[in-house]
Structures are given as structure tokens and as C-alpha cells.
Image: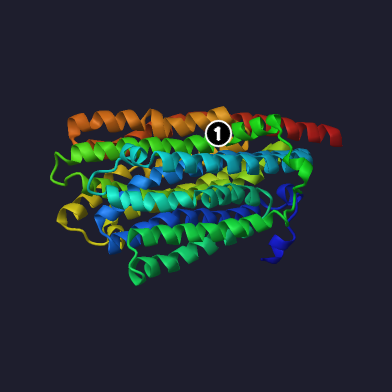
Amino acid sequence: MTKAASKFNTNSFTEWKISKLLLHFSIPCVLSLLVGALYNIVDQIFVGQGVGYLGNAATNVVYPMTVIGLGFAYLLGDGCAAYLSISLGKGEKEKGSKAVANVLIILLIISALIMTIGFCFQDQLLYFFGATDTCLDYARTYFRIILSGMFFYILSSGLNSIIRADGSPSYAMISMVSGAVLNLIMDPIAIFGLNLGIAGAAYATILSQLVTFLISLIYLWHSKTFKLSLSSFKFNPSILKDVVVLGVSSCITQLSIVITCVVTNHIMITYGANSEYGSDIPLAVMGIVMKVFSIVIAIILGISVGGQPIIGFNYGAKRYDRVLKTFKIIIISVGIVGLIATIVFEALPQYVILLFGVKGEEYTKFSILCFRIYLGGIFLTCLQKSSCIFLQALGKPVKAIILSLIRDTISLIPAVLILPLFLGIEGALWSGPFSDVIAGIVTFIIVVIECRHLSILAKEDNNTALKSNT
């Protein structure tokens, strides 16, 4: 830990230079979310090399279930993180402790429910998520094992958000990196060394999630701004309501990904069957594209979520000038990431595809097409996702929810259903940039209005301060 980081305390939110604060929070946060996204993509790479594209299709089919778990983890974890930051800014530490304790209880209950539903309705869920008869056996194997570790995945993901908001982004990063490194080591050993195939990838994943969970759990005895006691775990509906309201945007973002994945998978199967590619190639390729897409999103969310406690604390402390400056730096940083991603996906998609193994001419052709078209508007996606986190940090859940729904549900799903009627399977790919443009316009309008309001509040505070000093 750096010398600067060791001296961090709650006063640092209003005293440190904004760029210094963002580096303190965002770098560990980016790494944490990045390695979290790598859990899935590492499996995809090794499964593609060791099992083939049917294995990749199977992991794509199971992916929505993990996103559902992550959605509920973010609902409570991100909501609690925002609540904790705002409470600290107001000097209400006790409420923060109660929020953390109540969130832990609910996460336990949700984990048990998801696992129960998953085991009871396995085949129904897999077919719903887009499984074909040719990849169903692979999907069943992968699904059962991944579901067994869902408890560790949900708890560790929720705790990670709370740990970052508590002023320990480096610890959150260590917990995630430890699991990711273990997954990277165990995947080839289990798949190739032990000859376990797709089951080996799943075992490696849940083992790494267990390690991340244990490291995150240990932190609860070393927290900085909240202290858990038996009284903290007393059920508090009022606090939970506030937490859910603050976290619902993050949850909707994840659940909308599930809806999009399910609809897109079925479109890929239906229209792929009538194309030169067949059903399984588009299904497998779309899974790869979504996983690579999640890597970029992890980076921009890491930058944005890293700024969340800074924005939340200063908003609670009525330091609106620092709120605006933080958001400005975040947007510039996120825009640069989006621009780089656009260049890579448009100019060099064939090199990204090589990571997942060479599967034939049709496979490569559709992969290049998918990257260039579907991710053509990723620059706008980055700005839109970052703006959602900004509004969430301000305690503006309704506006954050609107932005979340506009891109991932309201514009994307109709487009992915309608455009293929005229353009075939390529129409499904054009739904991506279409929804990015629509969401970009709405995001610009909402964010400009909110920033103007903050500018007015900042000027009023400055005028008040000047009068009090005269």
C-alpha cells in the first residue's frame, strides 16, 4: 500500500485533489471488476481450445444465470456502497453499519433461492437461455457445477462493492485478483491435465470464487467506517428500502443483460439456421463477443464506480463543485477507453478472435462481422454506463434506471427482434449500434440537465460562503 493510501480517512474525500482520489479508488476498482469479468472469459478461452465451439455455446447459455446472481449482488452491494458513502458524508456512521449487516442477511437468502430454483428447473432454464440439443449436455454439466458455487459468487460480489466504499479499494482488488489468478492456473490443469473438459473449467471457477469470498469475509473484522455487532443485524426495513432504491439501477443493468442475452441467443439460433453459418456458430460467437464486451465495460465501470464514493460523500457534504469536477475527469477517462476499444474492434477483430481458437472460415467470417457491427457503438455505451453510475452516486435512482433501461432493454430488444425481419441475422447485429445512438441522445439530455442543476447549487454555496466571510 502506498504512503498516500495509508493516510486516507474520511476527511480525504473533501481535502485530497480529485485526480489523486480517483487514482486511489479507481485503479483497484478497475482491476477488481476486470478480473471479475475475466472469470468468464478465461473459461471461454480454455473451453474453446479444449472442448470446441459447442463448449463455448454451452458457457454462453449458462452465462445469464451468473448475471442474474450478479444483478442481485449489485442491487444490494452497490446500493449499500452508495448508502454508506452518503451516510458518511452526513456523519451518520451507525446507519452504515446497519445497512451492511442487513445486506449480508438478504444476500444469503437470495443465494439460497437462486440455487434452489436453478437445481429444480435446470433444463427449462437452459432451453430458455438458448440451449440447442447439440450443446445441451455440455450446458448441463457446466450449469450444475457453477450453480453449486453461486453462494460464494453472490456474497463476494456484494462484499466487494461495500469494501471499496469503506475506503479499501486495494483490499477489494486483492480479493478479486487472488481468485482470478487461481482460476487462470486451475483452468488448464483441470481441462487438459486432469482431462475434465468443460467440468474442469467449472470446478476451477467455483474454487477461485471460494477464495475470493473467504478473503472478502475476513475484511468484515477489519473495516474502517462501519463496525458490525449483533444489534446491527436487526432487520431494518427502512434502511433496506433506501439501499434497494440506490442499487436498483445496477441490478436493472445486469438483469437487462440477461433479457438481452436470452432474446439475442434465440434470434441467433433462429436466423442462423437460415444462413450459411448454422445455429451453433452464431450462438457461440455472440457469447464470445459479449464476454469481450464485458471486459471493456468492467474497465469503464471500474473508473466510474471508483468515483462513486467520492461523488456520494461530497454530494452528502454539499461540495457540489467537487462532484462536478470528479464527473468531468471520469467522463474524459471513460471516453478514451471507449475510443481505444472502438479502434481495436473495428481494425483488429481477427486478432481478438484468435484467442478463442480457430474454428473454420464461416466461424471467423461471422466473428469479424459481429465485432465490427454489434460493438460499433461501444464509445457511446461507455459514456452511457458511466452516466448511470454518476446518477446512482447522487442518489438519483429513477434517472439512473431510465438510462439503464433505454440502452439495454427499451431500444435494444425491439431492434434485435425487428431488424432481422429485413436484414436477416445481420439485422440482429445492427441492433447494438442502433440502441447505442438512441441511449446516447437520452443520456446527453439527462446528464446536461443534472450538471446544470449541480452548477447552480455550487454557485449558491460559493455565494453563501463569501457572504459568511465578509
Residue 97 pos. (x, y %): 74, 43
x, y percent for residue 292:
37, 52
Amino acid found under the numbered disc labelled 1: Val
Q: Is residue 387 above or below residue 49?
A: above
Please say whether residue 449 is visible from this viewpoint: no
Q: Residue 214 occupies which quadrant of the picture?
A: bottom right
Outermost residue, front side: 120
Extreme-bottom residue of the structure: 193
Q: Position of residue 248 (x, y in %)?
A: 55, 34
Q: Which residue lies at the image location 58% right of the left edge and 56% below the top edge?
A: 213
- Could you say which is closer to the camera, residue 8 or residue 165? 165
Residue at 23% across, 44% down: 133
Tell which of 433 and 421 is nearer to you. 421
Residue at 65% over, 45% down:
309
Q: As displayed, is residue 149 above or below residue 265?
A: below
Q: Nearer the viewer, residue 112 or 239?
A: 112
Q: Is residue 105 visible?
A: yes
Quadrant occupied by the N terminus: bottom right
Question: Where is the C terminus found, in terms of image quarters?
Answer: top right
Between 74 and 65, the one lying in front of the other is 65
Q: How is this picture coloured? A: rainbow
Q: Secondary structure at mark 1?
A: helix
Q: Residue at x 67, y 43 (%)?
A: 322
Q: Is residue 322 above or below residue 241?
A: below
Q: Kindly identify which residue carries mark 1.
A: 248
**Mark 1 Cα-neighbour bin, 10 Å: few <14, some 14–19, many ≥20:** many
Tell how many labels: 1
Q: Position of residue 303 (x, y in %)?
A: 54, 50
